[in-house]
Image (spheres, rainbow, N blue to C red):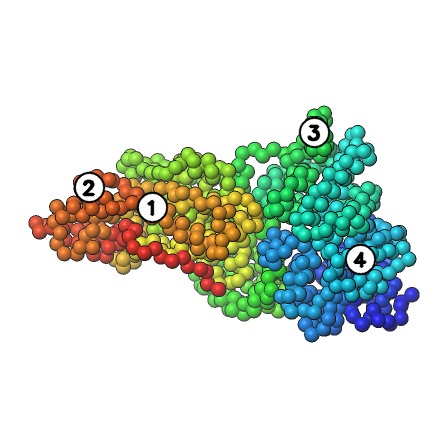
Amino acid sequence: MIPETGPLDQQITTVVGGGPMGLAVASLIARNVRTVYLWVPDARTYKKWKSERYLQVGEYSFNVPFNVEIITGYDHFKEGSHFLFLTIPSRQYEEVVENILYHLDRSLPHFAANITKGFLSSFSRRKHRCYLFHQLLYSLREQHHLNLSVALVTGPSLLYDIIHNNYVFFVVASDDPSMTQPIVDRLNGEQVYWSATDDIIGAEVGGIMKNPLAILGGMVEALPHVTSSLLGELMAAGFTEMKKLNAALGGREETILGRSGLADLAATYFSPQGRNRSYGRSFTEKLISGELSPNLIDQIQLFLVPSLFIEREVLSSKNLAEGGLAITPIIEIATEFNIDVPLNRVLYDIFLRRKSPEDIITLLTGKTERRNRIPVVKKKGRVELIASGRMISDHLRERILHRITLTRGMQARIKKQSGHIISSLEKRRAKALHKKQRNDAKNFGRELMLWKELAECREEEELQYIEQLVRFYADSIADYYVPAARTMLMRFVSPFRWILGGFRRGSVGPIVNGRIREIRKLVDNYPVFYVPTHRTHIDSVELVYGLFFKGFPLPRFAAASILMSNPIWGAFLKSMGAYAVDRENTRNILYLEVLTQYTTMMLESGIPALAYPEGTRSRTGEFQSIKTGLLSTAIDAFRESGHEIIILPISISHQWIPEDEVFNNQANDTGFWTYVFRRRRTYMDLGEPIRVSDFADKEEPTHEIASLILKNWKQAYRLQPHFIVARILDDHPGMIDRDELLAKIEAFLASYTGTVQETRPEKVLKIGLKLLKKRDLIAETRKGFEILNPSLVEYYGNFVPIGKDPKPEDPEE
């Protein structure tokens, strides 16, 4: 029977969520409201449900009332005053809520009741400076200038009991007392009972933390000799952890001791119909049977992106166990507040196969049970050092889509760019066809088609087409590193470098200096971000050889996408650890986001990374301004993962720069053989490691890190004799004799506090003059020294870092 129109119909009542909880709540409200809208977030579910009145969702079946209208698309929220019941799964909550609130009419009152409870993702916690889902509603209310009342509905009210009209007990938590009655009236039922509280923090923390504890209970329940006695002990210990986190976040203890805490925990923990308890029991049973033994790809993902591994495994289960999705933020927040939550940490480690369900019993009893122990995965070697960027591409796509939906206006800005990008791609495709670059033309054509589809689609379809573009860009950027390929090539080339270098020290690789042993030990334990000086294209080659022979982890590196035009050569470079960068596409917001997040996630995953903070090769020989945008990836990676990241400044000092004549307009380009024969002794000096954690909370962390990198470079950069001689001759352009030159070298060495190759003035004079004369840059006459090539003498003189430091440069908006 459909109710008559009444006061509850003054607002548009919408249940937001496309799962069994959404159907159950919509069916309950349909008894009290004339029209209920059930809004589902994706078009596929909408098409499937729209024409059906009998639905099977997981293990639950529903007869959908005739006054429940199933809808999709954000246009629904643009007009009218809305009363929202938010039941979407926690993994979708942030992006869906952001989009809904963005579309609400700011001139009308609205009401939101959270049935979904959860801790925010690390990204949203930083962005909104809060922790809980209801606090996100507060933040968005202020951001969008909405007249929005907020409440939370929680308590011992299992989905099974709601569907089967059993007794359920709700708590309405809100700082707005007027919210309680409208919610009670809509959810009114014969077996439904209510209470209210203004402690919305305590109510939500209780509603979140009960779920992981129920999973723990299910896990141990499947073990031998476990009955209610141990389950009771486990629940009490877990409840203590719940109280600790609740107190840290500002919730009241009496709330946790009541219906929305202890009662809700007991119902979820002991119910045989509870999804979280059932998931925990099934998990242990599958572990014992060997069904959950991770394959090689799973093991790599376990160590690179553990949160994705947990989420993927939870989502693959028949019924969603929210406790599995809550465990990662619980651990992150407990770490932030320095709170000891050993049971939750054990659950996290069990999900990651670091520990076994028996470890739950060990934690409670202090006794290790060794008989028939369930095996766990042990890390063998440095997994992240053999992993490729392609292995994190799934997580990369999910993160980018998450950021897009949670960044106000970003989706609209991406679509707004489509006209300009389409025009640019058409030109690039035509150019590639003209040059018969078939592979490039094919890729531009595919990208062009995707952008045209985005430009022409409806608003509710935009995210679907953006996801396809993200997938395209992620696949085009990602490396597929094969360690053996890189090692084999380096060993193959080494003898030729030895011969061309005249069999001298430093012929194969650079001469490496610094606190090598201590730094190597540090980077063996933490992800490392190498930040070298940049003077020549062969810097990367020297860097890799220097790291390789000293036993340092080798980084992934950027390569211009033009080098990937040939599929065979592109595959080779990517197998060597190169990821593609399309420098003509960096004004494309979406492409730049994919590229930035790719480098950030490599660091988070422990994959060594390399970037040149100066951005490009120095054409003058001087240190250039550091681009802080490159450093922000390290800051973001630390904030996202919570794991320490080491930035290692490196100074590379070449005897000669192969491109020096090009930089000084004395040649049009640098030929291959110039790179081969002009390479001579090179020095690679390691600076002092920089811990990102020391700067993450600073007001301008990238500026402070940039200044420290530059200071390291200037201190460690090894001045070769001809740099010093060139500097003195350039500073004194008139005739200067040998004695005067020697005196000035002595004065320079006495005052210079940086690193020099040679400390004896006579040797500096002898070697410096010999090298400069050999290149015909200077000539010695009876009256002194004549500069024959002023540009190159000035260029090499600029290698002496004297003068003001260049200021860091922020990225363009």
Of the pair 281 and 503, the residue shown nearer to us: 281
Q: Which residue is mark 1?
A: 715
Task: Describe the element under mark 2 as helix, strand or loop.
Answer: helix
Whichever of callouts 2 and 1 sits on the residue coming sooner in the sequence is 1
Q: Residue furthest top?
A: 371
What crowding class fits label 1: few (fewer than 14 Cα within 10 Å), some (14-19), or many (20 or more)?
some
Q: Nearer the viewer, mark 2 or mark 4?
A: 4
What crowding class fits label 3: few (fewer than 14 Cα within 10 Å), some (14-19), or many (20 or more)?
few
Q: Looking at numbered disc 4 in the image, what kind of residue is underneath it?
A: Ala
Quarter where residue 358 is shown: top right
Q: Which residue is mark 2?
A: 761
Q: Nearer the viewer, mark 1 or mark 4?
A: 4
Whichever of callouts 3 and 2 sits on the residue coming sooner in the sequence is 3
Q: CA distance from mark 3 to mark 1?
A: 53 Å
Q: Residue furthest bottom?
A: 107
Q: Is residue 399 left or right of residue 791?
A: right
Q: Nearer the viewer, mark 4 or mark 3?
A: 4
Mark 4 near mark 3, Cβ–Cβ under 8 Å? Answer: no
Q: Looking at numbered disc 1 in the image, what kind of residue is underneath it?
A: Gln
Residue drawn at (58%, 64%) of the image: 410
Whichever of callouts 3 and 1 sits on the residue coming sooner in the sequence is 3
Percent x, y for residue 68?
83, 64
Whichever of callouts 4 and 3 sits on the residue coming sooner in the sequence is 4
Residue drawn at (51%, 69%) of the image: 420
Q: Nearer the viewer, mark 3 or mark 2?
A: 3
